[in-house]
Amino acid sequence: MSYNGELTEILDTYLLPLKSIEEVINENRNAKILIETPLGFKNVGLEVVRYLSNKGFRAYLSGQNVWGTCDFSVSNDYQYIIHLGHALPPNIFRIINNNYRLERQELNDAVIIRIKNGPTVLFSAIYYEPKPDLLDKLREPVNNIIKSNPNALITYALPYKLYAYSIAKTLNARIAPGPITGCFVQFPIPNTILFIGSGYFYPLTFKLLKPQTTVYSIDIFRGIIEDVDYIYRKYLTMKVKAIHEFNNAKFVGIVISRKPGQYRLDLIEPLINRLKKLGKGYVIIDLNEVSPDYINNLPVDAVINTACPRIGIDDLDRFIKPVVNAGDILKLNVLDLNNLLVW
């Protein structure tokens, strides 16, 4: 495939648009810069800190995990936040834009938002550089799936873009017009999906949005291909259990998250009205991280999550108390399971 910008190789495994990043931060050579990454990319973040430090910039590595573009740092201690490894989908951008006054700019493999009276945030891609030996192991089994499902679509999370394009080109297969995230798919979902990546988080997005779709997860590094339907059914069972337990709750906590792309104050009034109709008492709880450490100790019978909807799906086996999403409660039929990612 062709690249829009020049990519720099890092650690013999990753490709980053470091020249584009440097072009932006050159506007203020004396700025403090924070590099943040998901846990799996901390080694890449360290290399970016070293690269920028050698160029004379004041760069720091964040020790915090970031789960997505929705929870990037907003700190006036830094003039630039460089957030590595996540795509910025339109739904998350709308939430961020509602919470801050922004200017947005596209620059090759990075998206830049400038927050009024706050930092400039660069959402930069990290791409895995395709390795021929890993591609060779998958070519035949992937080709067999495509032959049986000629309308199958190859999809990917942002770091696996180059792998996905290589496979699609080699097998002359259809490829998605852009990456997916855990809460957003930017294209119509066909009946068969081939997801290039690792783990279940991303491929399950398709099942949560369109349960009848067959989704094959193609784990590049383990060389494993599997239908994720059984994982989806496991999560579905936990979801139904949580909803039933919520129905028996008398006193409910409505949890709001302060993360920039999850702060949904607009959901509070509709939820309060819904709880009043259901005859339930409530308290609004302000949190940054909606995690079991906090939720399990709250003095409530159940929790409504207004933050990332994947919390009320993937993490249910980690909570002692029933946790449901705002979208579950605001539906006319709470047991309508056709789209579990409604906020």
Image (cartoon, helix red, strand yellow):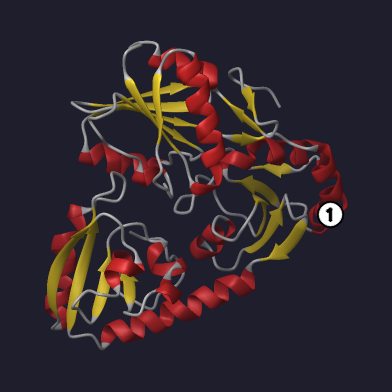
On-image quarter of the N terminus: top right
Left/right placement of residue 68 relative to residue 118 reads right
Question: Which one is nearer the viewer's eye here, 108 or 128?
Answer: 128
Left/right placement of residue 241 relative to residue 13 reads left
Name the secondary structure under disc 1: helix
Residue lying at 35% horizontally and 46% vertically, measured from the top left = 71
Quarter occupied by residue 90: top left
Q: Residues within 10 Å of mark 1 (few under 14, many from 20)?
A: few
Left/right placement of residue 301 relative to residue 86 reads left
Residue lying at 43% horizontally and 38% vertically, measured from the top left = 88
Q: Is residue 137 visible?
A: yes
Residue lying at 59% horizontally and 61% vertically, measured from the top left = 200
Q: Which residue is mark 1?
A: 147
Three-letter amino acid code of the residue under disc 1: Lys
Q: Is residue 248 above or below residue 62?
A: below
On-image quarter of the C terminus: bottom left
| Number of marks present in the image shown | 1
Left/right placement of residue 199 relative to residue 132 reads left
Q: Is residue 179 visible?
A: no
The residue at the far bottom in this view is 248
Quarter occupied by residue 233: bottom right
Query: Residue 120, how many percent across, how many down?
Result: 31, 25
Residue lying at 64% horizontally and 67% vertically, measured from the top left = 228
Query: Residue 60, how many percent across, how many down?
Result: 39, 30
Query: Residue 212, how many percent across, how many down?
Result: 59, 68
Q: Is residue 152 above or below residue 251?
A: above
Question: Which one is nearer the viewer's eye here, 146 or 319?
Answer: 319
Question: Which one is nearer the viewer's eye here, 207 or 260?
Answer: 260
